[in-house]
Amino acid sequence: HLLPTHDSTVGCEFKEERRRPLHGYKQRIQGISETVNLTPSNCGHHINISKTTWDNRKYQFLQMYARNLFAPLANFLYENENLTKKVFGRDFSGWCEYSDVTFKHGYWLNIRNNHEKNECCLEFRLAKFHDVDQFFYLINFCKDVMLLVDEFLNSDEVQKQEEKFNED
């Protein structure tokens, strides 16, 4: 189900209930795009993605390692404007600003945390729908980035850091 919501940076935005597997999702996007015009500049398409194991503790580690994890991608996107527009559907702007240091609301990538629900996610604010194939490719790209980040969060290096946190 699409739920109308509000974001201070765009005129209309919809949230969708959480989806686990992407099976059948491309057809769902096709159906939505035939019902609602998703291409106006005032229509937002942020992609929020995470693992069910990402909790408040993972959020702390995402914040701690954010620059190491995301600055190389930010710089690559910034230096390759045409490719960025092809994959993400647009370039950096006032509601999805470039940064290789800050990853919060208003920037191209927002590391979001919901303390009450003990969960966090990556919000790709640079995302913009142009057509079904482009957007589905982008969703899979964001999923792959999330899986790489998750692999890092479960690495020996981070596990050792987490053990130190637990000792303190």
Image (cartoon, rainbow, N blue to C red):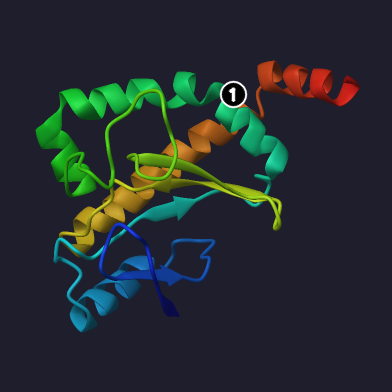
For disc 1, the marked residue is 64
Q: Residue furthest front?
A: 8
Residue drawn at x 35%, y 24% as measured from the top left: 100
Relative to 45, say whether 158 is above or below.
above
Relative to 86, say whether 20 is above or below.
below
| Residue 15 image position (x, y, % from top left) | 42, 69
| Residue 138 image position (x, y, % from top left) | 30, 49
Q: Residue furthest bottom?
A: 35
Residue drawn at x 15%, y 42% as measured from the top left: 85
Tag 1: amino acid: Met
| Residue 35 image position (x, y, % from top left) | 22, 83
Q: Which quarter of the figure has residue 39?
A: bottom left
Pick the front one: 115 or 148: 115
Horizontally, residue 115 falls left or right of residue 44, namely: right
Horizontally, residue 114 falls left or right of residue 81, namely: right
SS at mark 1 in the image: helix
| Residue 63 image position (x, y, % from top left) | 57, 30
Horizontally, residue 87 falls left or right of residue 18, namely: left
Q: Which quarter of the figure has residue 37?
A: bottom left
Horizontally, residue 115 falls left or right of residue 75, namely: right
Pick the front one: 110 or 30: 110
Q: Is residue 24 visible?
A: no
Q: Is residue 94 visible?
A: yes
Residue drawn at x 43%, y 34% as measured from the top left: 103
